[in-house]
Image (cartoon, coloured by chain):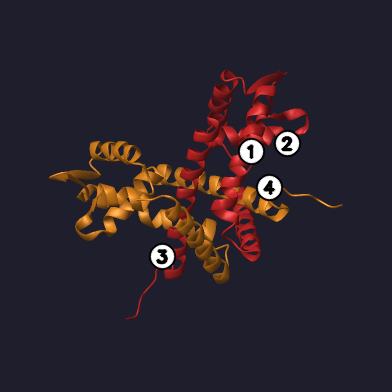
Chain colours: A red, B orange
Amino acid sequence: VATVTSATELTGPESAAWRLFMQMQESLRGSIEQQLQTDSNLSSTDYTVLAALSEAPEGRMRALHLSQVLQWEKSRLHHQLTRMCRRGLIERQNEGRTSYAVITEAGRAAQEAARPAHTEHVRQLVFDRLTDQQVQQLADISRTVLNGLRSDVPD
Amino acid sequence: VATVTSATELTGPESAAWRLFMQMQESLRGSIEQQLQTDSNLSSTDYTVLAALSEAPEGRMRALHLSQVLQWEKSRLHHQLTRMCRRGLIERQNEGRTSYAVITEAGRAAQEAARPAHTEHVRQLVFDRLTDQQVQQLADISRTVLNGLRSDVPD
């Protein structure tokens, strides 16, 4: 059977890869969300923000930089940071027109307490299953797609 | 410099791959969400449900099966289906204690109208950038992780 594929159609292997990828990342997100909530009472978003801040100099980042690192829109980040402020995990600082987020002692403690179980979960779900070569392939594929996404979106 | 890595720590390459992967999939989700909303007034979740139903026999699936395919919890799926019913994209059918979702003519038309631009977007962001070999690698990695996730979660 001859198949005519239009310019926008995905090929069979592309379509199969896309479905598997979408299902995988959806399931992975769900599993990680559940693990973090159950073990540490944090959303995966809380964890991502705390992890980024904990590695920044003095535990502090410009909100703008944080939104770029996380690839989030300003309003989404704003709501997230407001919730985290209320829980005492971070503080905000404003200097002139520049807004910063700073991790608190409580935030640092929460991230450090959550980290081992979270890392172990990620290890079991992903890295215990992949070969070293696949880890490298995943990094290369992710970098390639990410670079394309970033050049699509002007700063 | 000798580095002592505890059992739960990720290695350098694993940690780098994980960050790139997480950023990539977060950015990709955001970009796809925006494209579907702008071009077709559908969320990516709406699209995923419509696409699954449109390929099912008679455009109909058991809600339970849909929740397994999508890897979603029952309550999340329920809210999603309720919203889609209200918009006339799907209908529900109940036979005894079994609940079904059925795509409507309007739902099918919406999915078919949305499909070319969505597929083109995915092609540009992902498949135009990857080699055939990388497409195969992505499928293999996704399948491996997904199989692990599914065996972790008993039905």
Picture quadrant where residue A16 is located:
bottom left
Amino acid at circle 4:
Glu
The structure residue drawn at horizontal position 36% and vertical position 55%, both measured from the top left corner, is: B115
Q: Residue A108: x, y in percent?
A: 68, 28
Between circles 1 and 2, the one closer to the viewer is 1
Picture quadrant where residue B55 is located:
bottom left
Q: Residue under circle 3?
A: A9
Q: Residue A54: x, y in percent?
A: 70, 33
- Between the residue at mark 1 and the residue at mark 3, the CA separation in whole angstroms equals 42 Å
Say if labels 3 and 2 share a chain: yes
Between circles 1 and 3, the one closer to the viewer is 1
Amino acid at circle 1:
Arg
- Which type of secondary structure does the marked residue at label 3 adopt? loop
Specify few, some or many for label 4: CA neighbours under 10 Å numbering under 14, 14-19, or 20 or more. Answer: some
Q: Residue under circle 2?
A: A55
- Between the residue at mark 4 and the residue at mark 1, the CA separation in whole angstroms equals 9 Å
Q: Kindly give the residue lying farthest to the front in the view shown.
A: B7
- Which type of secondary structure does the marked residue at label 4 adopt? loop
The residue closer to the viewer here, B112 or B137, is B137
The quadrant of the image that shows the C terminus of chain A is top right
Query: Could you tell whether A90 is left or right of A24 in the image?
Result: right
Q: Kindly give the residue lying farthest to the left in the view shown.
A: B96
The residue closer to the viewer here, A19 or A125, is A125
